[in-house]
């Protein structure tokens, strides 16, 4: 399952935020989780050229693998995502024992330089400043490099061992994988195809997020994908809506979780989109009638 989601929005008056409503909430949660401070100090995201993100012909999805390379001293250690196409559809009745543990391709791509949060100039405990960082951030290095399947598999194990959470349930990350399918049958949407139509995309930037909602399954550490233009700025969809890809697999791993997550998200996004689209339309109308 994948969905185009809002980056940030005002909620309807009758709906209270749970702190997991939008992408900015998730990124803020990740930055401020004490148990993940070492992880968030090492990396908050990375950037791929759009050529690495385009789906290969006949592929079902883009697949990201969580990696932790601790072979160097702490300042030089890296946390990053490795990307590949996936030729395999994700069955809705897939058992946990069937979740992939090994990349499909012999060679994947990784960012040469993942980036960290700028704690010197922004306060991570202030969601407004986290937002400002995201809006202003530009990568100094957008290059990627090859990484082997075997290396990704070993670095994925290291990620789970070090940042997965308590050993008995590893609620932060049980599977070092984020699978973003293109066609989502529940919504009849080709999510990646629609994402690529949001504007003149030159890069795809990922951020780590953390879902703190009660009862969330393993893999609370989430991946969110931003469209980025030539100038390294985040692109905004028409009316400012549905500009981020979120809700990768896993979780969920059961039909009950699947439909709960899909329809909860769909209902929230539809309500929020309607509100913001109406505000956007009013703004355009006012601008068109302003006399200079």
Image (cartoon, rainbow, N blue to C red):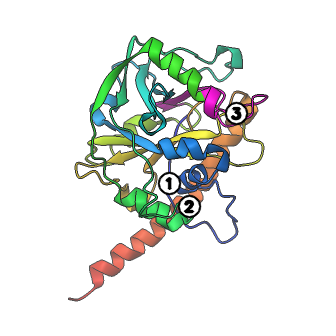
Task: Write the residue at 69% across / 20% down.
Answer: 93
Does 186 sit above or below residue 129? Answer: above
Indicate which disc, 3 or 1, sits on the residue closer to the N terminus: 1
Q: Which residue position holds label 1?
A: 6
**Kind of element beneath mark 3:** loop
Q: Indicate yes or no whether the magenta region holds residue 166.
A: yes
Give the numbered dot on residue 272.
2
Q: How far, Cα to Cα, is label 2 from label 3?
A: 27 Å
Q: Quadrant of the C terminus?
A: bottom left
**Kind of element beneath mark 1:** loop
Give the number of marks.
Answer: 3
Q: Is residue 206 visible?
A: no
- Give the residues in magenta: 160-184
Indicate which disc, 2 or 1, sits on the residue closer to the N terminus: 1
Q: Residue furthest left?
A: 292
- Crowding at dot 2, Cα within 10 Å, few <14 / some 14-19 / many 20+, comes out as many
User: Which of the 4 quarters of the picture holds residue 204?
Assistant: top left
Q: Are marks 2 and 1 in contact (CB under 8 Å)?
A: yes
Give the numbered dot on residue 218.
3
Q: How far, Cα to Cα, is label 2 from label 1?
A: 8 Å
Percent of width and height locating residue 92: 65, 24
Q: Nearer the viewer, residue 222 or 110?
A: 110
Q: Indicate yes or no whether the magenta region holds residue 143.
A: no
Indicate which disc, 2 or 3, sits on the residue closer to the N terminus: 3
**Kind of element beneath mark 2:** helix
Q: Residue furthest front?
A: 73
Front label number (3 vs 1): 3
Q: Are marks 2 and 3 in contact (CB under 8 Å)?
A: no
């Amino acid at each position: 399952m994948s969905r185009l989601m809002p980056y940030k929005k005002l909620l309807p008056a009758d709906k209270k935020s749970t702190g997991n409503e939008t992408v900015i909430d998730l990124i803020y949660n990740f930055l401020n989780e004490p148990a993940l401070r070492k992880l968030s100090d090492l990396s908050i995201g990375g950037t791929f050229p759009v050529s690495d993100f385009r789906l290969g012909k006949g592929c079902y999805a883009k697949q990201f693998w969580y990696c932790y390379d601790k072979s160097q001293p702490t300042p030089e250690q890296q946390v990053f995502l490795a990307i590949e196409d996936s030729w395999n559809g994700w069955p809705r009745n897939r058992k946990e024992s069937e979740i992939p543990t090994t990349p499909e391709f012999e060679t994947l791509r990784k960012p040469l330089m993942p980036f960290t949060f700028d704690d010197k100039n922004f306060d991570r405990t202030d969601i407004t400043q986290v937002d400002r960082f995201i809006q202003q951030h530009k990568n100094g290095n957008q290059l990627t490099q090859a990484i082997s399947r075997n290396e990704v598999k070993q670095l994925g194990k290291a990620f789970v061992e070090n940042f997965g959470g308590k050993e008995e349930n590893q609620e932060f990350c049980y599977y070092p994988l984020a699978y973003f399918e293109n066609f989502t049958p529940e919504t009849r949407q080709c999510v990646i195809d629609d994402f690529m139509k949001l504007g003149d995309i030159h890069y795809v930037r990922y951020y780590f997020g953390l879902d703190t909602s009660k009862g969330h399954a393993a893999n609370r550490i989430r991946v969110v994908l931003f469209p980025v233009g030539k100038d390294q700025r985040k692109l905004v969809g028409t009316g400012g809506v549905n500009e981020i890809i979120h809700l990768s697999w896993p979780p969920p791993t059961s039909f009950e979780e699947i439909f709960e997550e899909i329809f909860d998200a769909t209902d929230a996004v539809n309500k929020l989109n309607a509100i913001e689209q109406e505000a956007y339309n009013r703004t355009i109308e006012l601008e068109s009638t302003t006399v200079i």
